[in-house]
Amino acid sequence: MPDFHRHLLPRAALLLALGFAIASASHALAAPSATVRIQNFAFVPAVVTVAPGTTVTWTNADEDPHTVNANDKSFKSAALDTDDKYAFTFTKPGDYAYFCSLHPHMTGRIVVKAP
């Protein structure tokens, strides 16, 4: 084996190991998330408990449009058509009640608790 190939093999192995380490670290650092489906004129699940820093994503699975509006006005989506999504990151602990402004009987809650 030529001399320069012997030096390339350890470097290639090192680069491969570094790539896996970086990929693992970035996956571990991914922000926490939670999902809520809007289906059959309901938020499912109706109550979600998360840690601060969690991004909650709502997806409209109904054929009718819906919105996601906080009672305290801290977040508000536009009208979501079928398969549209809305995401909000909860940074502070608290109890966040919300509703659909087009169908006010539809309600839900996000509970943000420090771990």
Image (cartoon, helix red, strand yellow):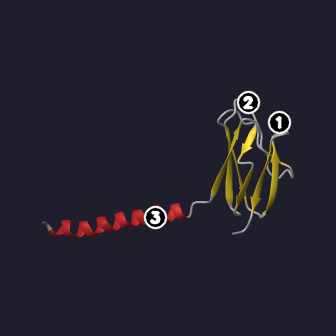
Q: CA distance from mark 3 to mark 2?
A: 43 Å
Quadrant containing the N terminus in the rendered view: bottom left
**Residue under the point 46% across and 64% down:** 22
- 13 displayed left or right of 27: left
Type of the residue with mark 1: His
Q: Is residue 67 above or below residue 70?
A: above
Type of the residue with mark 2: Asp
Callout 1: SS? loop
Callout 2: SS? loop
**Residue under the point 70% across and 29% down:** 63
Give the number of the disc on residue 22: 3
- Quarter of the image where one finds residue 83: top right
Type of the residue with mark 3: Ile
Q: Is residue 74 above or below residue 1?
A: above
- Residue 58 position, x and y percent, is 69, 45
Q: Which residue position is annotated with label 2?
A: 64
- Residue 96 position, x and y percent, is 81, 55
Q: Which residue position is annotated with label 1?
A: 103
Give the number of the disc on residue 90: none
- Crowding near the residue tagged with mark 2, few <14, some 14–19, many ≥20 C-alpha atoms within 10 Å: some
